[in-house]
Image (cartoon, rainbow, N blue to C red):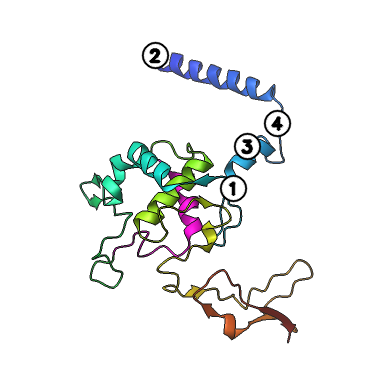
Amino acid sequence: MYVFRSVLMLTLLNCLVLTSALSGQERVGRYQLAEPISKDALKAWNISVYPNGKNLPEGSGSYEKGKTLYVQQCMSCHGEDGKGGIKLDPYRGAIERLVKSNQDTLVSERPQKNIGTYWQYAPLVFDYIRRTMPYQAPKSLDDDEVYALTAYLLAENGIIDKSMVVNKNNLAKVKMPNIDGFICDNKIDTKSAPCMKNCLLPGDVNYQWLTVDSTDHLKSDCLVPPDLVFEKR
């Protein structure tokens, strides 16, 4: 019993000390959950690159530099020349190939979804490498290094020439082999039309409906948004 009471008193004392420390700090925000994020910190996370190349940074990279980087940073997991790497665990196979082989296809019993057979937009290769690779140190590569690895992988897949220096001006112009292999499902929920004020409920008269131009409804190029027409009925 004595030991229990001692532990209880120590726990209460620690809670009291922690509460006192927090009360002495400046609390921020209505819900007091976090400090405001600085512009520099936000900039470090705001790195999304769009399929059309929007937000690609300055810089460039060559096949030769990318090949060297691949050996140093990527081969241990993805295998020599991007042809498959380590086995992840007893229940999953080896890491899939990054580079297409002559036999790889998407219409076989076991489709191979690598860069050469599956990826739709070249800028997304850059985006994925920059935010997630290498596995043990994501976002540690600078933009020139990411461009170089992108150039290496695209060239190894036969998509670009090995002499091409990849940069923000030409990467989005690279046509991927599977560019027409997708159906863009950009349908809009017509019963949830955007509304900012005096919004009507579904049962109200003159409820706002949204119609979508069917000619833009299904396009293989998801960069093209549908034409939206707002009307009241």
* Residue 88 in the figure: left or right of residue 21: left
Label 4: how many Cα within 10 Å (few below 14, some 14–19, many 20+): few
Tell me the tag on residue 57: 1
- On the question of residue 207 being in view, the answer is no
Disc 4/disc 2 C-alpha distance (Å): 37 Å
Looking at the rendered structure, the secondary structure element under dot 3 is helix
Q: Residue at x 54, y 57 (%)?
A: 170
Q: Position of residue 182 (x, y in %)?
A: 44, 72
Sequence order check, earlier mark of 3 and 1: 3
Disc 4 residue type (three-letter): Arg
To which residue does mark 3 refer? 41
Q: Amino acid at mark 3?
A: Ala
Left or right: 153, with 217 as reference point: left
Query: Is there a contact, CB below 8 Å, between mark 2 and mark 1?
Result: no
* Eye-nearest disc, 2 or 1: 1
Q: Is residue 48 magenta?
A: no
The disc label shown at residue 147, or none:
none
Q: Check disc 2 and report the residue beneath it.
A: 3
Q: Which of the two labelled residues, at mark 2 and mark 1, occupies the earlier sequence position?
A: 2
Q: Which residues are magenta?
A: 112-135
Distance from the alpha carbon under mark 2 to that under mark 1: 62 Å
Q: Quadrant of residue 101?
A: bottom left
Crowding at mark 3 (Cα within 10 Å: few <14, some 14-19, many 20+): few
